Image (spheres, rainbow, N blue to C red):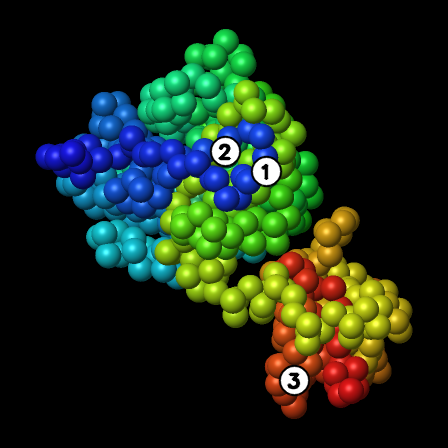
């Protein structure tokens, strides 16, 4: 018989494991998924949130009438709001403007106040999410900043609960633990417990977006929310969270967005588990790990949240096509193969250098992107800040509006419309409309080609 609880807070943790029998078919090592979306607030973060609130009360940082403030992609905010409201506090959640809209709606439904901050700004910028919430916590009397990134009560929750659960549920047979790394609380706490209890026998594997810095990427943007470490090109001093202890992680599987997103969709269709994109990344990593193992090994992969919060993203065919994560036989692949490599101009390039680059650009127009030293995986569509055309630059030089050594960033034209590689030429022409010189074609969320009117006409 199911449990009866006096408070929803007592229903946090104690989540089941499900064998991934279909995705794991043909793989010798069994893979079990820890269903963290079954927590009362719908995610793994309920554990860390409750742990942080109780620790703050214990340490005298949170007193009756107090306010909880936090920067959160949503799930920590939900956990903090549930725990905070149950214990009588006001809750303010700061959310990135790139986070799924449904997440903010849920926060408000539970009684939080939501403030938003832009994603694409360096950490030094006062508009950055962390600076915004820090300011609120200073200005509001009795406010406490939960600071999940550096709060030891975050990994602690997993040392006390998630780790022991995984150990007991598998009867001590777990050999590999796989999880994504956001704040690092989950992998650090669960991983360190499992290593200790097993005498170092459990291997801990991080599932990281390909371009995230945890696993060695350049820090350029990716599309799987809530995991990885992003690096803005203008951020000077970058800090990793203290909730993350890199020595706990034995290895990383670096998962491209497409692999993570397609795996999340497969998980729903083949296993009956509707989970979010970070679960897709984790399962993709677990499958890679398990393929290298034998029947005496046992892999546990942690699924942080439900797919219900992402129905308009990873679980939407339209969204997947628009960002270039789904191909189709009548798509743009043949046209981009003919178009040649994309010419881009960085925002800090000079007008003279931009004019030279534009000589090779189709239609004499190129997207302007945030400066990054290397672009090993293409230009992320979210870092395109505008466009420049040969005509506009030449005109500015001719009428004295610009000099050849001026930065091109001051002469930005509008951003170009985008289409996914799986969209049809007709859809691309519709996006082009009358006013735009070309459309950017996205493959896996990254701009790889610019198609102009002539190229789309055929
Ligand atoms: N996936 C989702 C959906 C999350 O909300 C989070 C937490 N932000 C994570 C993964 C990463 O967990 P952690 O912060 O414990 O590393």
Task: Please tell me whether residue 189 is drawn above or below residue 77 in the rendered image.
Answer: above
Residue 351 falls left or right of residue 140? right
Name, please, the residue furthest toward the left: 6
Residue 288 falls left or right of residue 78? right
Q: Which mark is residue 26?
A: 1
Q: Secondary structure at mark 1?
A: loop
On the rendered image, what quadrant is the N terminus found in?
top left
Residue 272 falls left or right of residue 284? left
- Expressed as whole percent of the image width and height from the top left, the position of residue 400 reads 80, 79
**Disc 1 packing (10 Å; few <14; some 14–19; many ≥20):** few
- Which of the two residues, 325 or 348, is positioned nearer the viewer here? 325
Q: How much space separates mark 1 and mark 2, taking CA atoms?
A: 11 Å
Residue shown at the point (26%, 56%) measured from the top left? 108
Q: Which mark is residue 94?
A: none
Q: Are marks 1 and 3 in contact (CB under 8 Å)?
A: no
**Disc 2 packing (10 Å; few <14; some 14–19; many ≥20):** many
Q: Secondary structure at mark 3?
A: helix
Q: Which mark is residue 31?
A: 2
Looking at the image, in which quadrant does ligand 1 appear?
A: top left
Q: Is residue 51 visible?
A: yes
Determine which residue is flagged by label 3: 426
């Amino acid at each position: 018989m199911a449990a009866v609880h006096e408070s929803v807070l007592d229903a946090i943790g104690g989540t089941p494991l499900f064998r991934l029998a279909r995705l794991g078919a043909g793989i010798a090592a069994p893979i079990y998924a820890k269903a963290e979306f079954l927590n009362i607030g719908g995610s793994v973060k309920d554990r860390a949130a409750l742990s942080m609130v109780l620790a703050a009360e214990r340490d005298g940082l949170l007193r009756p009438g107090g306010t909880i403030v936090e920067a959160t992609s949503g799930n920590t905010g939900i956990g903090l709001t549930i725990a905070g409201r149950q214990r009588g506090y006001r809750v303010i959640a700061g959310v990135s403007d790139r986070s799924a809209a449904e997440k903010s709606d849920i926060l408000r439904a539970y009684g939080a106040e939501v403030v938003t901050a832009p994603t694409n700004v360096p950490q030094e910028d006062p508009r950055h999410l962390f600076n915004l919430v820090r300011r609120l916590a200073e200005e509001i009397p009795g406010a406490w900043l939960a600071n999940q990134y550096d709060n030891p009560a975050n990994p602690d929750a997993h040392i006390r609960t998630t780790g022991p659960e995984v150990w007991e549920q598998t009867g001590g047979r777990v050999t590999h633990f796989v999880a994504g790394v956001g704040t690092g609380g989950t992998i650090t706490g669960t991983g360190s417990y499992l290593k200790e209890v097993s005498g170092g026998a459990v291997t801990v594997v991080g599932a990281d977006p390909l371009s995230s810095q945890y696993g060695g990427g350049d820090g350029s943007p990716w599309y799987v929310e809530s995991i990885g470490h992003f690096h803005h090109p203008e951020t000077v001093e970058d800090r990793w969270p203290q909730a993350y202890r890199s020595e706990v992680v034995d290895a990383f599987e670096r998962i491209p967005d497409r692999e993570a997103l397609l795996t999340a969709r497969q998980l729903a269709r083949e296993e009956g588990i509707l989970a979010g994109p970070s679960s897709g990344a984790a399962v993709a990593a677990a499958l890679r790990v398990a393929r290298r193992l034998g029947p005496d090994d046992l892999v546990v992969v942690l699924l942080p949240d439900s797919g219900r919060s992402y129905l308009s993203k990873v679980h939407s065919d339209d969204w997947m096509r628009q960002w270039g994560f789904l191909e189709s036989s009548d798509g743009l692949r043949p046209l981009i193969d003919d178009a040649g490599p994309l010419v881009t101009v960085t925002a800090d390039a000079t007008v003279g250098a931009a004019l030279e680059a534009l000589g090779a650009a189709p239609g004499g127009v190129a997207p302007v992107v945030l400066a990054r030293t290397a672009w090993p995986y293409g230009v992320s569509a979210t870092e395109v800040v505008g466009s420049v055309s040969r005509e506009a630059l030449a005109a500015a030089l001719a009428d004295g509006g610009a000099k050849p050594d001026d930065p091109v960033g001051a002469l930005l034209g509008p951003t170009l419309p985008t289409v996914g590689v799986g969209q049809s030429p007709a859809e691309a022409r519709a996006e082009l409309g009358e006013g735009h010189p070309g459309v950017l074609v996205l493959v896996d969320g990254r701009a790889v080609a610019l198609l102009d009117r002539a190229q789309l006409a055929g």
